[in-house]
Image (cartoon, helix red, strand yellow):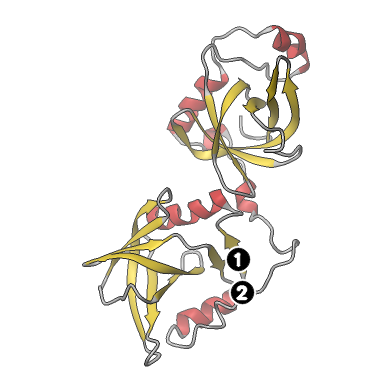
Amino acid sequence: MRVIKAETGFLFYQRIFKQLMADESTVVVWQVSPETGQRNITDSKINALHFESGKIFFDLSSSELKDSLPLYCYAEAGPLIFKTDIQDILDNNLGVAVPQEIKMLEDPEVFLIKGSIGRDMADVWRVKRLTDEQDEIPSDVLKVKSMAERSSRDQELLNNEFDPPVNLDQEEKLFADKRESPRARPKIDKFVKVAKIRGSGPEIFKLFDLSRGGMGFIIPDESIFLKGEEIHVVGFNEFDLDHPLVGKIMSIRPIDGAPSEFKVGVKFSEGQD
């Protein structure tokens, strides 16, 4: 069993729920009566995601759940299981808190869940502490998409951003011949949305320069990122990418004449242009 925690797998975490909703996957939900031990089990589907307010909304096949009891949820499409609390119940609409963690199940565990949801679930929720080696980011989080694999809206936005009709400043002219992809400085202020692979996010920073091979952005504190850290670029200005750009922090240096500003240099992973 692999445990994915909300605070350490932000993008992967959101993607799980978005995929369940997009595929209209069935989510089996149930509660356990503390008096009798009986389980009230029903099928549901995710119909809305409000990560900003920390809620997930379901359509239920029945509405006999109680907001005073914890809710257990299983999706075979994961396969995954999580535990949460009910926030709102209105007829067959259910609002629950975004869980703090999701458990990705292995085949033997799936067999137990599918065949015996009526049994005592305490051992499923007994959390063992993962070692640093086990608590790894799923490889899917770092998977890159080529431009051809991206959605049409992503392609249009990125091609416009990568090839702006602007002139390079003196610094960029000095080093342009040393780069495979010359970087262009935007004429007007633009902003980039950056999320850490490990940690909360995303945060918005002022874009310094951009090319098909990488980018630079400005941060107010050099301790925000670490050299060598993997990041996701999830959007520009008000635009959210359908699939993020994957990159690595290559440098963090102060900006001349701006003692409280630092430029972060990012190299995009190969295969995304």
Whether pointer 1 and pointer 2 mark residues with C-beta atoms closer than 8 Å, the reply is: yes
In this rendered view, identify the residue nearer to me: 59 or 50: 50
In the displayed structure, would residue 249 be above or below residue 256? below
In this rendered view, identify the residue nearer to me: 143 or 52: 52
Could you classify mark 1 by the number of other residues whose Cα lies within 10 Å: few (under 14), some (14-19), or many (20 or more)?
A: many
Rendered image quadrant of residue 123: bottom right
In this rendered view, identify the residue nearer to me: 110 or 185: 185
Where is residue 86? Give x, y as percent: 36, 68
Q: Which mark is residue 127?
A: 2
Where is residue 217? Give x, y as percent: 63, 26
Rendered image quadrant of residue 224: top right
Specify the farthest residue to the front.
259
How many numbered tags mark residues here?
A: 2
Where is residue 73? Give x, y as percent: 43, 71
- Identity of the residue drawn at 50% across and 64% down: 78
Quadrant in which the N terminus appears: bottom right
Specify the farthest residue to the left.
91
Kind of element beneath mark 1: strand
Could you classify mark 2 by the number of other residues whose Cα lies within 10 Å: few (under 14), some (14-19), or many (20 or more)?
A: few
Where is residue 97? Give x, y as percent: 41, 61
- Identity of the residue drawn at 66% across and 27% down: 214
Q: Amino acid at mark 1?
A: Val
Specify the farthest residue to the bottom.
36
Quadrant in which the C terminus appears: top right
Q: Give the mark nearer the N terminus: 1 vs 2.
A: 1
Provide the residue designation for mark 1. Answer: 3
Rendered image quadrant of residue 210: top right
- Identity of the residue drawn at 70% across and 31% down: 267
Q: Amino acid at mark 2?
A: Val
